[in-house]
């Protein structure tokens, strides 16, 4: 408790901590929203590949002594588009392609780092992330990029959703699938690039996929899934920041640990997993649709008035619910 | 400004003369890489027609439908829909007037979409890019659900429905688009007898009441004969076209299915 108070006091006092908080919230929002669509489109490995090429970009920027954000953006957008192209033309299997690209960019990154004459601590901070050292200008740039991504995402939300459901059907229904796929890939790479400072190249992808995966466990609504994902993402980013500041731990790992904990809890208590064996059936008698085991209430049903269930086209009535009838009178 | 816009519109949406085909394929051949799936396809479909396409497995029925939709590009010949060829300019207009019901495929049990959300996808092309659906769209969505008798399930997760129910939802999705042409790919496989009846009756009703142009693919010839106005039999190419009750059809069917 005193730790919390201490954290809040520090938050009032220090501008660097305020900036860290803002970037934690924004990283939480954009990563977890983008993540929903990456998860549903099953592009998880692709995101991982982009994260690693972004790191190679960072290393090159540091080597050349220019702003790493430029080279990061360049590398990640380039790799995203080339992966998208190979996938579109079905040149090789996309997993193979991503594996190849991913290793190659890692090799490039190591090469660039090896070529540096002076050892730069920036390398470590980009690899592992440090949310506490974000500057004012960086933060403003970061906010502008994030706002653009959010705006775009909400503009193309319904089409992206259709594409995750059935991409071929989306295409023949008039959705400009090709354009949107590339646009989305660019959005993913920009998201990863701007989040790199805060959580680091190795862990940035956890921030994208884990909140969405946790949210997926709870709901069948896309909108609710997006809201939950943002909630999980922001909560763990802020909580991770608190842990990082209070116990002097690397921010990337505290944030990812927090979000992983949320995922584990979600998985264990997932209402979807519990319900996944149920099916819906049409009652042959009253034409109502019922979940297996649900009780029928309709008055038109031939078993109306008696508590019963429909299981596999059969009416099942529990003995204790059968109304008791008096024995009919008769004469001997 | 408005005048020029109008003009452009008119040239794109050229109205068809009466009696002209809405779908016109000439000498079409389609291949997957080096493997030719269909060839020598000459086919005209007229407004208000219900055309049945029959053929054995791997005879290229699905390929033909995808070619009509512009999802596959022919390596030879020409495809014209409403008198237009597919191009970046025309494809959106063409596709917004065609609804396609794909061959039944498994839907992830946990996919985060309700039945109504899936049907709503049918309105996306009408609403246009970047725009959310409005209340009129939702009215149409519920009308379509009503038409297939699935209104009660509107709020259920799509993955929880049985295969036949999902098929009906996909039909509702196609109807919500208010199409002029309806393409159905094996709509009755995986359905039990009662479901087949209700889907068939639905298609019949749509054809009669809304004067939809329908192209329906199946390998169930009995079913097609019952409600199609014309039948084409295919086995990589169209081997026969004609009246559903022509006795010649029996011979053709025997030939292509027992080859
Ligand atoms: N995506 C694809 N890539 C390569 N070949 C394909 C592809 N889709 C279909 N084919 C081939 O094209 C041929 C025609 O396939 P198509 O799916 O059109 O047949 P169909 O008549 O719809 O069969 P079914 O009755 O089984 O649905 C088949 O030989 C098939 O192997
Ligand atoms: Mg097929």
Image: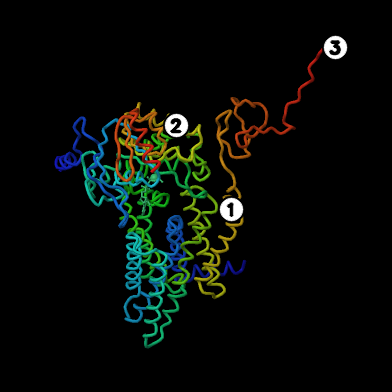
User: Residues at badges 2 and 3 in contact (C-beta under 8 Å)?
Assistant: no
Chain under callout 1:
A
Kindly identify the residue that appears in the image at 16 percent across and 41 percent down. B11
In the image, residue B243 above or below residue B158: above
Q: Residues within 10 Å of mark 2 (few under 14, many from 20)?
A: some
Disc 1 with disc 3 on a shared chain:
yes
What residue does disc 2 label? B146
Residue A332 marker? 3
**Left or right of A54 in this view: B8:** left
Q: Earlier in the sequence, mark 1 or mark 3?
A: 1
Q: Between residues A90 and A234, which one lies in front from this camera angle?
A: A90
**SS for callout 2:** helix
**Left or right of B251 in this view: A303:** right
Q: Between residues A59 and B149, which one lies in front from this camera angle?
A: B149
Q: Picture coordinates of residue A222 (x, y %)? A: 46, 49
Kindly identify the residue that appears in the image at 85 percent across and 11 percent down. A332
Q: Quadrant of residue A298?
A: top right
Residue A270 marker? 1
Judged by depth in the image, the label closer to the viewer, 2 or 3, is 3
Q: CA distance from mark 2 to mark 3?
A: 58 Å
Kindly identify the residue that appears in the image at 72 percent across and 28 percent down. A322
Q: Picture coordinates of residue A267 (x, y %)? A: 58, 57
Q: Picture coordinates of residue A273 (x, y %)? A: 58, 52
């Amino acid at each position: 408790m005193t730790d919390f108070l201490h954290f809040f006091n520090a938050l009032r006092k220090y501008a660097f901590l305020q900036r860290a908080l803002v970037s934690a919230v924004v990283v939480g929002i954009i990563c977890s929203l983008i993540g929903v669509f990456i998860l549903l489109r099953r592009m998880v490995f692709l995101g991982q590949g982009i994260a690693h090429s972004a790191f190679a970009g960072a290393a090159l920027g540091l080597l050349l002594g220019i702003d790493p954000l430029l080279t990061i953006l360049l590398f990640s957008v380039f790799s995203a588009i080339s992966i998208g192209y190979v996938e579109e033309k079905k040149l090789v299997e996309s997993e193979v392609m991503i594996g190849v690209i991913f290793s190659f960019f890692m090799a490039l990154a190591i090469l660039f780092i090896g070529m540096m004459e002076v050892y730069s601590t920036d390398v470590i901070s980009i690899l592992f992330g440090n949310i506490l050292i974000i500057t004012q200008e960086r933060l403003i740039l970061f906010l502008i990029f994030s706002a653009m991504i959010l705006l775009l995402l909400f503009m193309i939300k319904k089409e992206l959703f259709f594409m995750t459901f059935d991409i071929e059907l989306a295409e023949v229904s008039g959705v400009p699938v090709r354009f949107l796929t590339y646009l989305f890939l660019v959005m993913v790479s920009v998201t990863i690039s701007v989040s790199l400072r805060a959580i680091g190249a190795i862990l940035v992808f956890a921030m994208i996929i884990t909140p969405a995966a946790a949210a997926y466990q709870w709901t069948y609504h896309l909108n609710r899934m997006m809201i939950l994902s943002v909630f999980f993402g922001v909560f763990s980013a802020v909580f991770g920041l608190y842990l990082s500041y209070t116990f002097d731990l690397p921010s990337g790992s505290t944030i990812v640990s927090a979000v992983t904990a949320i995922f584990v809890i979600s998985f264990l208590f997932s209402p979807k997993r519990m319900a996944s064996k149920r099916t819906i059936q049409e009652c042959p008698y009253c034409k109502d649709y019922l979940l297996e085991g649900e009780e029928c209430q309709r008055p038109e049903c031939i078993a109306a008035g008696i508590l019963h269930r429909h299981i596999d086209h059969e009416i099942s009535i529990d003995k204790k619910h059968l109304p008791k009838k008096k024995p009919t009178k008769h004469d001997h | 400004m408005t005048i020029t816009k109008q003009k452009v519109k008119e040239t794109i949406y050229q109205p068809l003369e009466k009696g002209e085909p809405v779908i016109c394929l000439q000498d079409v051949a389609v291949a997957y890489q080096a493997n030719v799936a269909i060839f020598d396809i000459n086919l005209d479909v007229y407004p208000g027609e219900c055309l049945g396409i029959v053929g054995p497995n791997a005879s290229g029925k699905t390929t033909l439908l995808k070619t009509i939709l512009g999802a596959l590009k022919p390596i030879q010949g020409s495809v014209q829909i409403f008198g237009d060829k597919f191009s970046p300019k025309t494809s959106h207009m063409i596709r917004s007037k065609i609804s396609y019901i794909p061959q039944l495929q498994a839907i992830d049990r946990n996919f985060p979409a309700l039945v109504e959300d899936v049907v709503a996808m049918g309105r996306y092309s009408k609403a246009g890019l970047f725009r959310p659906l409005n209340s009129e769209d939702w009215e149409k969505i519920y009308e379509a659900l009503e038409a297939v008798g699935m209104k009660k399930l509107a709020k259920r997760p799509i993955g929880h429905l049985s295969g036949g129910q999902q098929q009906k939802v996909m039909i509702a999705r196609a109807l919500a688009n208010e199409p002029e042409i309806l393409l159905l790919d094996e709509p009755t496989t995986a359905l039990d007898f009662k479901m087949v009846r209700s889907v068939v009756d639905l298609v019949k009703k749509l054809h009669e009441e809304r004067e939809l142009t329908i192209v329906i693919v199946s390998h169930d010839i009995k079913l097609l004969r019952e409600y199609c106005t014309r039948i084409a039999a295919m086995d990589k190419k169209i081997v026969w076209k004609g009246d559903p009750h022509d006795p010649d059809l029996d011979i053709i069917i025997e030939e292509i299915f027992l080859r």
